[in-house]
Amino acid sequence: MTRLDTKDALASLYAEIEGRNPAQPEFHQAVHEVLETLAPVLEARPEYAEAGLIERLCEPERQIIFRVPWQDDRGRVHVNRGFRVEFNSALGPYKGGLRFHPSVNLGIVKFLGFEQVFKNALTGLGIGGGKGGSDFDPRGRSDAEIMRFCQSYMTELYRHIGEHTDVPAGDIGVGTREIGYLFGQYRRITNRWEAGVLTGKGQGWGGSLIRPEATGYGNVLFMAAMLRERGEDLEGQTAVVSGSGNVAIYTMEKLIALGANPVTCSDSGGYVVDDKGIDLELLKQIKEVERGRVSEYAERRGASARFVPNGRVWEVPADIALPSATQNELDGKDAETLIRNGVKAVSEGANMPTTPEAVQLFQSAGVAFGPGKAANAGGVAVSALEMTQNHSRTSWTAARVEEELDRIMRDIHTTCHETAERYGAPGDYVTGANIAGFERVADAMLAQGVI
Ligand code: NDP
């Protein structure tokens, strides 16, 4: 087939997928972004198309939707919806986080699960892809309410997961506290100490050192690798970071450690810009200990910081940008602003934070662009290392985990870079990540037959 024929075939396949999955715009976006880059590999390897690989890859192996009833502190009953999409297990047990946020629906879980399949393949660690969550809103809920919700959620989820089957972890709204409540309920129901069933556990009961830091640290390592390709490093670079959760905080920590200067953070209420650079201890105190808002950071920090309600963090001039909050938070207009202000590189800590239009603009302007499925893979990679430690009942030192994380992120960068070159798209990390992830999953699926 010629390139044109392949592109036509992919376009009609995409139209079919869109039709079969109505009202799931985020899932459509994630699929489209991958299919758009696969033509060269499908031409080079016609056996993929013959085996119906794209069709199979875009259809989750299993989709579970369930009711999650729970009582608030006043005794009122609430009903939320729980999801777990087990997308692809050709390379290992389904692996991917749980998101608790009011915006969660099946389409969002499917987009995240689809991305996860490629991301996990890129780590080279033998993990399949899945994702889950609920439309539960944890904001303003007491510890006791969070615990009751997690227990109810696990009361259904437990029958679908297991260390060799499906291993959930955290994502937006799910951190060590929630993983603790989920793990406790799983242990109670099953009467098994099965540490490898969930990752992101706490220290002392099966958690890995550096897991909380891994996604943010990994993203900065990926950014550093992209800059190295251009003969630069992180020293002295001003960085805009969005979000103020797990990924954002540890992105800033690593940026500071490597000599860069993060000057912003944000939440859904607005953003903070701090001319002196973000004071990470203060931000951690407010977000991790007090579970407060970034506006409080500006109130307590003094004259160098101000809070911009409802503003876009991308209007702050910077050398590098690391979106770390949520999907589609950086659009075409934001990209134009960043480019006008001289941004050199963008690396995605969040999943799909950059709209397709913005990605296009960055690439046309020669801005290095690291897609989330490569750049934020450090979190799931260390989750897989947590599983390894659980299986062998050992606990690695922080230095050992960091060393592994560093190696994995360098490997992912090299793989994406070399794959892009091999398929005629030098410097295009989107194409490199999509094709490299696809090849690994596709080869395993080919070998395992039509299932
Ligand atoms: P957290 O819940 O710890 O933090 C999320 C942050 O993003 C908060 O500051 C939150 O603000 C903000 N945010 C969330 N939704 C919105 C929204 N709709 N509009 C504006 N701000 C929003 O989540 P994580 O840091 O774990 O996750 C952040 C991103 O990173 C997600 O895309 C996630 O999928 C991705 N990711 C996470 C990994 C991990 O290991 N945790 C691994 C790989 C990717 P507010 O409190 O106001 O909602």
Image (cartoon, grey):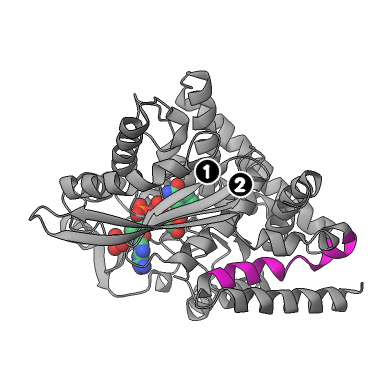
- Residue 441, above or below 194: below
Residue carrying label 2: 120
- Residue 269, above or below 248: below
Q: Amino acid at mark 2?
A: Asn
Q: Amino acid at mark 1?
A: Val
Please tell me whether mark 2 sits on a helix, a strand or a loop: helix
Quadrant of res 77: bottom left
Residue 369: % across, % down = 61, 62
> Quick check: can you spot residue 345?
yes
Q: Ligand 1 quadrant?
A: bottom left
Q: Residue at x 35, y 28 (%)?
A: 203
Residue 404: % across, % down = 58, 31
Q: Residues within 10 Å of mark 1 (few under 14, many from 20)?
A: many
Query: Upstream in the sequence, badge 2 or badge 1?
Result: 2
Q: Residues within 10 Å of mark 2 (few under 14, many from 20)?
A: many
**Highlighted magenta segment, given as a residue range:** 27-46
Quadrant of res 304: bottom left
Marker disc for residue 380: 1
